[in-house]
Image (tube, rainbow, N blue to C red):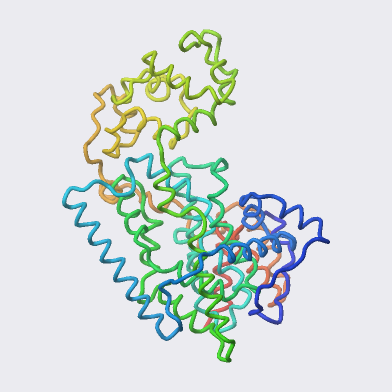
């Protein structure tokens, strides 16, 4: 990470509104090598983990051009001019609120959850969408260098709020990283490549702001409007005892009064040309708005959950580590466990053999399965082999339809450790109710386990040390460049980035 702070920020070009045009890269071997990969993740990684090289930024720009060509052509509900944007926003909000109220009424009438069948389904969703959530707000990053331009101020302020204005407990990426860690959902290095497409779009926009300003404005306009799935996700996560704060925070900051939704409309109006451009700005804005529809969406992820497939994936991923770790006495269906695990392709047959041999009793309480007792409970021989997320999936898979009660695997584990009968509550406490009970007993809030940015002097961090060392030695312009670098997608969620965000706000908006 240290090299990020030492990197040179490209100087701002004279123009910020050029029209994208195809370019030829046939004489650039490094760029060709980058583009030869069909992997979204291979383009995503250098944009999120550091300051990308010029060839990497160019490859991202080419990807955006291809994406813009792939956006659906046809009617959309965006108005034809800025004069109608506020009315459009209000109408969209009212429609979403109406649908959400209908959802609540059906739930109160006894309808089941609409999104998540059980707790593992919800955790699966949080894990699968991580590549997009971990770059939240990144499409606006490139505008920080233009914070002095009043026509871009609403966009820059929105980016700073995505960064929590330097507070760790409000920084969206910091919050999501905490969510992944809290529920044992990381690492996420085995996700399907398609899940990186939407995050790549956002990063590519952020690193090529000078070329794609109208598209950024359009993307921001569409993306910051309140979607129905955000409200339902937050409701059902809370119901399943999973912290919904990351999602409820977006509901509040994207409000249509003073929030990002209204600010996005105003930004579209402010950035529009005052001179006649033949409608080019609005055409490109509309194209940018459609970029948010590309990639694997929220509902696609939710519908894609298959617990049988997920169990096979988990065991297949674990097989190389387990192969050779068992003694010759460990056998299932007369075959050594080491042999079963020698090839991940054996996993479905291995699971069937475990069930046939009575090691796993499907559609029964998990504690009645001998295999589960190897994973959890007193003197569990395989304790620590599976992550909390993986344990939840196995737990729900064994219990079958009964897992619809949303119980955590920890309920069974606690019952085993106390010798009590594992009775899973029909309606587990929601996250908010459980949190209120914890606080009433004098516990500290589990929703804010991150140190606030005001205590950054207590953090031990190499980039923070470099920032403190370099900042006083630079002139005002160079200081601004350094702070902007530290607010990049790679760093803004770290101690250095949080400190830089506060310093940037102080220098830019000090009265």
- On screen, residue 471 above or below 282: above
Q: Position of residue 510 (x, y in %)?
A: 54, 80
Image-based side of 439 in relation to 391, left or right: left
Residue 160 visible: no
- On screen, residue 44 above or below 282: above
Q: Pick whichever, 209 or 460, lies toward us.
A: 209
Image-based side of 492 in relation to 240, left or right: right
Q: Position of residue 457 (x, y in %)?
A: 57, 58
- On screen, residue 12 above or below 348: below
Image-based side of 214 in relation to 411, left or right: right
Q: Position of residue 268 (x, y in %)?
A: 49, 79
Q: Position of residue 190 (x, y in %)?
A: 56, 40
Q: Which residue is farthest right?
A: 27
Q: Which residue is farthest bottom?
A: 275
User: What residue do we see at 43% from left, 71% from top?
Assistant: 76
Q: Pick whichever, 307 or 141, lies toward us.
A: 307
User: What residue do we see at 51% from left, 59% from top?
Assistant: 294
Residue 405 visible: yes
């Amino acid at each position: 990470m240290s090299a990020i702070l030492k990197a040179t920020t490209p100087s701002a070009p004279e123009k910020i509104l050029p029209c994208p045009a195809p370019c030829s890269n046939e004489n650039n071997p490094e760029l060709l090598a980058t583009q030869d990969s069909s992997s979204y993740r291979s383009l995503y990684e250098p944009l999120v983990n550091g300051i990308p090289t010029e060839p990497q930024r160019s490859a991202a720009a080419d990807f955006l051009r291809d994406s813009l060509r792939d956006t659906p052509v046809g009617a959309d509900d965006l108005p034809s001019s800025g004069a109608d944007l506020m009315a459009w926003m209000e109408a969209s909000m009212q429609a979403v609120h109406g649908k959400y109220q209908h959802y609540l009424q059906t739930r109160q009438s006894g309808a089941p959850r609409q999104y998540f069948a059980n707790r593992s389904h919800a955790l699966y969703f949080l894990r699968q969408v991580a590549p997009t959530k971990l770059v939240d707000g990144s499409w606006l990053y490139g505008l920080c260098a233009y914070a002095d331009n009043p026509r871009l101020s609403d966009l820059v302020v929105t980016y700073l709020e995505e960064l929590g204005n330097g507070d760790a407990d409000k920084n969206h990426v910091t919050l999501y990283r905490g969510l992944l860690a809290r529920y044992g959902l990381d690492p996420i290095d085995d996700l399907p490549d398609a899940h990186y497409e939407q995050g790549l779009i956002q990063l590519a926009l952020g690193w090529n702001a000078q070329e794609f300003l109208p598209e950024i404005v359009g993307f921001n306009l569409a993306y910051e409007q309140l979607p129905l799935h955000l409200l339902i996700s937050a409701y059902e996560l809370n119901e399943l005892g999973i912290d919904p704060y990351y999602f409820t925070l977006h509901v509040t900051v994207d409000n249509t009064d003073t929030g990002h939704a209204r600010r996005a409309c105003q930004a579209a109006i402010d950035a529009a040309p005052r001179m006649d451009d033949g409608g080019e700005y609005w055409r490109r804005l509309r194209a940018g708005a459609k970029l948010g529809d590309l990639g694997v969406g929220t509902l696609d992820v939710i519908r894609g959950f298959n617990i049988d497939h997920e169990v096979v994936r988990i065991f297949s991923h674990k097989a190389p580590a387990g192969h050779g770790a068992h003694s010759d006495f460990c056998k299932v269906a007369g075959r050594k466990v080491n042999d079963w695990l020698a090839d991940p392709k054996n996993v479905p047959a291995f699971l069937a053999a475990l069930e046939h041999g009575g090691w796993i009793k499907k559609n029964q309480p998990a504690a009645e399965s001998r295999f589960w007792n190897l994973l959890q409970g007193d003197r569990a021989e395989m304790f620590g082999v599976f992550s909390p997320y993986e344990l939840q999936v196995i737990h729900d898979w064994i219990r079958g339809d009964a897992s619809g009660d949303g119980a955590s695997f920890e309920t069974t584990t606690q019952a085993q450790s106390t010798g009590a009968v594992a009775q899973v509550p029909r309606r587990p406490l929601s996250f908010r109710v459980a949190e209120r009970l914890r606080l009433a007993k004098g516990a500290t809030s589990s929703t804010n386990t991150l140190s606030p940015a005001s205590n950054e002097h207590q953090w031990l961090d190499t980039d923070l040390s470099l920032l403190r060392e370099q900042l006083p030695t630079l002139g005002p312009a160079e200081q601004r460049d350094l702070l902007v670098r530290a607010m990049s997608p790679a760093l803004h969620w770290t101690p250095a980035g949080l400190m830089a965000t506060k310093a940037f706000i102080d220098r830019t908006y000090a009265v």
